[in-house]
Amino acid sequence: MEIIYQKIIDTFNANEQVFIDRNLPIIRQIDINYGQPDNPEGFEMFLPGIYISWSIVKDSNNEPNRLILDFHCLQEPGAHTENYSERLPEGYEYIFMLKTIKYILNKLRATNTSSLQYVGERPNITPFFRYHIITYQCFIDEIDDSLTGGSLTEVELTDYNATHEIKQKET
């Protein structure tokens, strides 16, 4: 997962000019979704931001694992998209931002995944934000980079021995 996550970050960093050319604010924060949209007071958040959640699904033994990515796209509140708003053209900025995010994601592929494929999008509302979740899927190599298919040699347990030795001495 870290390979595709880093690729997402690198792709958005390399394409800041795409936002600037469209008179849009650049994405200020990309992070794993730890519940920031539901509890912004518990996190340091910079908007506009993208918070990523994912799931890995094993469809069958003969198929690669499917990676489903949800991009929670947040922007500053106050879209002014009401039909009677005098600031309606400014309100379109949110829609243009979502289109730009999709434009960038449509080009994305990591070394251990197939190309991202657009699945859909939906609004989401929390007590703090109204925002969109854009969903993509791809296939991910379960041997090299699945959360369920890794081996113990890929995980460093740096403090395990010290903790284990202390517990043994106490008993």
Image (cartoon, rainbow, N blue to C red):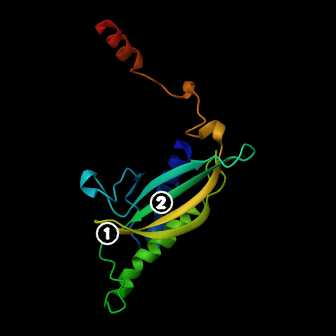
Q: Secondary structure at mark 2?
A: strand
Looking at the picture, does residue 63 appear above or below residue 29? Answer: above
Q: Residue at the location (36% across, 82% down)?
A: 90
User: Of residues 12 and 145, which is closer to you in this image?
Assistant: 145
Work out whether mark 2 precedes mark 1 in sequence or the reverse, and give the earlier one: 2
Disc 2 designates what residue? 71
Disc 1 designates what residue? 76
Q: Locate residue 118: give its quadrant.
A: bottom right
Q: Secondary structure at mark 1?
A: loop
Left or right: 168 as drawn, with respect to 108: left
Q: Residue at the location (35% across, 9% down)?
A: 168
Residue 145: image location, x then y, percent: 60, 39
- Give the residue type that dot 2 points to: Phe
Residue 75: image location, x then y, percent: 36, 68
Left or right: 123 as drawn, with respect to 44: right
- Give the residue type that dot 1 points to: Glu
Residue 19: image location, x then y, percent: 45, 68
